[in-house]
Structure formats: structure tokens, C-alpha cells
Amino acid sequence: MLNIILMGPPGAGKGTQATHLVDKFHLPHISTGDMFREAIAKKTPLGLQAQAIIARGDLVPDDVTCALVKERLSQDDCAKGYLLDGFPRTIPQAEALEKMGEEIGRPVTLVIDLEVPEAELIRRISGRRVCPKCGASYHIDTMKPKVEGICDRCGAELIQRKDDNAESFKTRLDNYYKSTQPLVDFYKAKGLYKCFDGTKPLQELLGEISAELEALK
Ligand code: AP5
């Protein structure tokens, strides 16, 4: 079963790869970042709680994030697998996910880590434009939409994320090194970890990741 985690620092290309992989492998795309942004847009209690945390680049508390993912993984469309994007991000979240996997009979089968140097992350984040409707990601220089400012997939107007500024990015990167990078050893010890060069062109990287997923089917 394809029970997949996509991890990597902010701007590594998780969302970009996920968008293509879920179409190709017919998996539900579970992005905690997208779920929080949707809650913020709808002004739900979760959104109101998460708004300021996300804007400054900090992590939403583990208990809140884990409850959200647990509920999502219990839905019917995850019965044949899932693609988690941006979760887990801390050791307690990874431990909680192990429990969830046992409970629903769908343990993680592969962890894909996208490695990208810091200078390239900064370049990507500062030029990123996103679709607020379908979550697709573009870049003003290197991944332009067909029509400037408009999403190729759903036609919505592209925006710049509130946390895509220098100060929030620094906090996000610090949090990544402190809280998320320890997951590399956690998953290596379980034989689930596979690292990819995230600086490769989108289609080439997609091909490499797809080959890995095909082998798991
Ligand atoms: P989240 O939305 O997950 O943000 P993130 O991890 O910071 O990652 P990004 O979305 O910024 O980058 P990405 O890796 O998806 O890159 P993308 O594909 O867009 O989380 C946001 C916030 O929510 C967190 O900061 C936190 O507050 C909270 N949160 C979420 N999950 C949480 C959790 N588990 N626990 C606690 N809090 C949580 O690509 C970036 C750019 O690069 C784009 O412009 C793209 O076009 C370009 N690009 C992509 N691939 C390539 C390529 N191969 N070559 C060249 N350019 C490329």
C-alpha cells in the first residue's frame, strides 16, 4: 500500500510534487498546511487558533495537528493509501502517526525527503505564488503559469502566502532544523527513509519518485 510521507524544508517542493503524485497514483493529498490555510480562510475555531502561529512561521501545537490528521486519515478515501505532505513535523507527531497507522491498519510504507540547499529555498519562497483554491504552486521566474497570475489547473487568481516573507521563513527554517530534521534518523532506523535531490527539474524528480512508488504498489 502507498502510505507515503513527503518531508523537506519550507520551499523544498513537497506541495509541487504532491500535486502531481496524487493525480498519478490516485491518492488523497493530506497537506496539514493546506488544511490550516483552509480553516483560516473559513475563520473556523481551528483557523482562528492557527492564524497568528502560521503567519510568524511557528508550528501549530502537536495535539491540535495530530487530532486533525487522525480525523482525516479515518475517512473512506484513505482506505487505499494516502500521501501526507508536511506531517509529521516533530517526533511526537511521528509517534502519534505510528499509533494512527496501527489503528487504521495503514502503517507508513515510505518517507520521501526532498533535499534542497538554503540559498535555493530562499529563491523559491520569495518568488512563489500559490493558488488559494486548489493549492497549486508556481514561481514568478522558473515555474510560470500559462497566463500570468492565473492558476493553470482551476483558473483562480494566484496569491503570495502571508508566511512567505524573510522573517517568517527564517523561523520556519529554524523550526525545521530543530523539530523536523530529527525525523530523518527516526525513519532511517525503521528502514522507511529515502532521500531525493530536490534541486532536480520537476519532471525528472517526479519520474524518480514515481519509480520508487511503482515499486511499492
Ligand atoms: P506548509 O504549507 O506545509 O509549508 P512548508 O512546510 O513551509 O512548505 P511550503 O509549502 O512552504 O513548501 P513546499 O515544500 O510545499 O514547496 P512548494 O512545492 O510550494 O505549512 C505551513 C505552516 O503550517 C507551517 O509553517 C506551520 O505553521 C503549519 N503546519 C503545517 N503542518 C504542520 C505540522 N505538521 N505541525 C505543526 N504545524 C504545521 O515549492 C516552493 C517553490 O519552489 C514554488 O515556487 C515551486 O514552483 C518551486 N519548485 C518546486 N519544485 C521545484 C523544482 N523541482 N525546481 C524548481 N523549482 C521548484
Image (cartoon, rainbow, N blue to C red):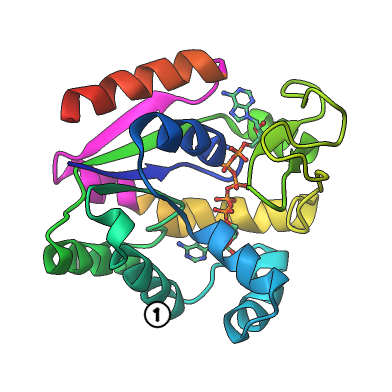
Q: Is residue 215 magenta?
A: no
Residue at the outermost right position: 148
Quarter of the image that includes the N terminus: top left
Residue drawn where x is 75% and y is 37% of the image: 151
Q: Is residue 191 magenta?
A: yes
Q: Which residue is mark 1?
A: 63
Residue 48 in view of the camera: yes
Number of numbered discs overlaid on the protein picture: 1
Residue 3 x %, y %: 25, 46
Residue 83 x %, y %: 36, 46
Q: Residues within 10 Å of mark 1 (few under 14, many from 20)?
A: few
Point out the stretch of residues depicted in magenta.
183-201
Is 11 left or right of 123, judged from the image as shown? Answer: left
Residue drawn where x is 83% and y is 45% of the image: 157
Residue 161 x %, y %: 76, 53
Is 121 left or right of 142, judged from the image as shown? Answer: left
Residue at the outermost bottom position: 45
Is 22 left or right of 107, judged from the image as shown? Answer: right
Could you say which is closer to the camera, residue 136 or residue 187?
136
Residue 58 in view of the camera: no
The amino acid type found where label 1 is placed reads: Asp
Above-or-below relation of 30 to 2: below
Above-or-below relation of 86 to 208: below
Quarter of the image that includes the C terminus: top left
